[in-house]
Image: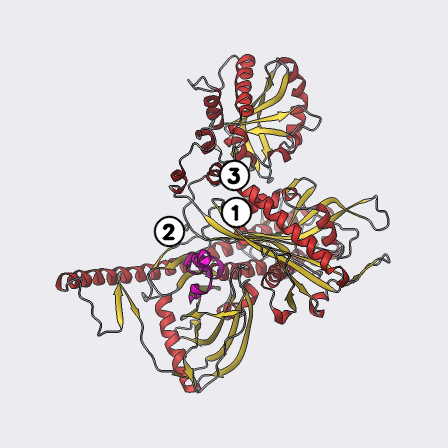
Amino acid sequence: MAMSCKDGKQPLNMDNGKYVRYTPEQVEALERLYHDCPKPSSIRRHQLIRECPILSNIEPKQIKVWFQNRRCREKQRKEASRLQAVNRKLTAMNKLLMEENDRLQKQVSQLVYENGYFRQHTHNTPLATKDTSCESVVTSGQHHLTPQHPPRDASPAGLLSIAEETLTEFLSKATGTAIEWVQMPGMKPGPDSSGIVAISHGCTGVGARACGLVGLEPTRVAEILKDRPLWFRDCRAVDVLNVLPTANGGTIELLYMQLYAPTTLAPGRDFWLLRYTSVLEDGSLVVCERSLKNTQNGPSMPPVQHFVRAEMLPSGYLVRPCEGGGSIIHVVDHMDLEPWSVPEVLRPLYESSTALAQKTTMAALRHLRQIAQEASQSNVTNWGRRPAALRALSQRLSRGFNEALNGFSDEGWSMIGNDGMDDVTILVNSSPDKLMGSNLSFTNGFSAVNSAVLCAKASMLLQNVPPAILLRFLREHRSEWADNNIDAYAAAAVKVGPFSLQGSRVGSSGGQVILPLAHTIEHEEFLEVIKLEGVSHSPEDPMMPRDVFLLQLCCGMDENAVGTCAELIFAPIDATFADDAPLLPSGFRIIPLDSGKEASSPNRTLDLAAALEVGPVGNKASGDHSANSGCTRSVMTIAFEFAFESHMQEHVAAMTRQYIRSIISSVQRVALALSPHLGSQAGLRSPLGTPEAQTLARWICQSYRSYLGVELLKSNGEGSESILKTLWHHSDAIMCCALKALPIFTFANQAGLDMLETTLVALQDITLEKIFDDHGRKTLCSEFPQIMQQGFTCLQGGICLSSMGRPVSYERAVAWKVLNEEENAHCICFMFINWSFV
């Protein structure tokens, strides 16, 4: 039956073979019905004919066909709209790439010209000659100018002149060749999900540049970016002190901005800025900024205590409308962060353009994309929260952590004396604003009246352990460092009652259940609720265990991202879990200090192969470690907050100080285990280097040969150490499980650790049943008697789960009983063949 999909022209195919067209009135009536119910049932179609007389001469079968065709046209319309949007985006991206190609060609031409000039200059001028008549000094092809400028006029006319200069310099950085931009480490060439990102090379200060597409109009983009505290987590405040309109319709603003210090080892930064907003002749919107210094005849900002005055060189945003909606945006950040003012160990952080790109430049693009994504999605998530509300909770956690870490006196923080050691700093805050959210009255009659908040903070240097790996371990294995009694004490400051959680678990370990709330695009950051099972007790019944809930923010979990700060911030939440729930954030921040290329796999956890090659402890030459080109350093900052009553200050301070020191000790132990080179040099031997591990490897191979009649390893080595090394490097995942009522894993080779996404330190937290789904558990239970009687069994391919909840497929698996020297069953060994993450 031939049917037409043209609106209003659809024929009626009657039984006699003739086509009858719908009248305009019938089409209008059907369209109204379609908007109410696009897919009516048979009963509903008969009802429509009875209720609408104009359709009385149409058979129900024809009504069904009309609705089918109408749905077809709607689907085609949506697909056409989607393809048009994709085409507009590709067109805009093509334009962006062409502009970037033109800029790169100009840069290449300029570099070729400079190269020829310096070659000629080198031939014509003796190298020992030094020109002292000029104020510029030429070093490595770059001109570092040190002019002595007179003070600039800061009157309205003078500010307009500075604004126009700032605009010109900013545009030359955004689209020209004023700065040599190079590809950011870790980013693939060309555009990706984060846009085109580059960092400065050979210029004053640190610089980063990004360009990309966002699904927002230019005015909305400029409005969001000018509200810097909303998207830049390190920004404490931006105060607009003066606004001057310009004749061309633009605006000049004088701003004072403060940035939080990222660690306890350095002061914060502040800026005295001019911001110029204007519209170019082609309709592009520009927001550019620069520091004001050495000015006269106008406003000024004197130095502020606890801050170091930094300089913002011409920076800003170029926003151009995109055909069909959305914007093309260029972001430039160029700063001199005064690295001289921080300890030498931290200076790489303040001299790193990569760190600036991750924290500021790329954060701006991510935030804009997040806003655009929220606008195009459902207003309410399955948690009953709007995306903007969840984002606000993330911002409150991050801001509260920064406030506690910095401890500014104008927010009510004051330092109290130490116990003779200065490794942990204790601050107290008794201001009403800080206590507003923590003085709660329980509905069941119990009360908690807190008169102050205490913060304990410390920083430590870490080596040879990537921040993302360490943070992932701290998140997944809280029991390795946290004290349940302290968690219960912190939770007592908020109301605890019935708590209803929906959603699926993404992980659980040691009484800890992780339930996801939301994540930002590209999974750069995610928010979750942590359920600590039975760590507290009910006031009504002290014998009744009670769960504690934490709101937790995680970011920087991507091991492949270069220069990314990793954070784990959490706070107890009350029973209502309201959007304005009181929060006292605590947590960890790990900042990489070098951006050396990691010589490891993306899933590296505990690489103990190097330890296997080392003989007895102390036999390794001391120079070997220094030759490790993959050495990385990072600084970890810890800050924990607790509400307390004033008469308990000394007791709570002593408890908190001891708790922070225990956490530092636990983190150091974990970091040593996660760092093979540092661990071997420090004299720590892994379980694989012990005689027990070598014996276990020999038992595994002997039992496999005994039951299956073939060799497990293709090795000519006869010694136990050689067997252990070959087993460790085996390509298939091999792991042993103890014969207990609740079987836990006791050993795994490198492939097994990668598959489980865990470490030897945390392996014993994983039980056998947790890695299988329901079908896998049933299969294993049915095959277990055969393993014990026959000695082995072969399992068909299937799906299991890593410790982080990721599905892992395997082609097949073999399980066999491992016998000791007395021929008694020691454990069960599993080998998963050809496994991969789904």
- The three-letter amino acid code for the residue at tag 2 is Pro
In terms of sequence position, does the residue under pointer 3 or pointer 2 come before the other? Answer: 2
Residue 400 can be seen, yes or no: yes
Residue at horizontal 72 percent and vertical 60 percent from the top: 649
From which residue to which does the magenta span run? 335-361
Counting from the top left corner in percent of width and height, residue 547 is at 75, 47
Tell how many labels: 3
Please state if 77 lies on the left or on the right of 31 as rendered.
Answer: left
* Amino acid found under the numbered disc labelled 1: Ala
Q: Say which mark, if any, is on residue 468.
A: 1
Looking at the image, is mark 2 or mark 1 nearer the viewer? Answer: 1
- Asked if the residues shown at circle 3 and circle 2 are in contact, with their CB atoms under 8 angstroms apart, the answer is no
Q: Is residue 770 depicted above or below 117 in this figure?
A: above
Q: Residue at x 13, y 64 (%)?
A: 124
On the question of residue 57 being in view, the answer is no
Badge 3 amino acid:
Thr
Q: Which residue is mark 3?
A: 605
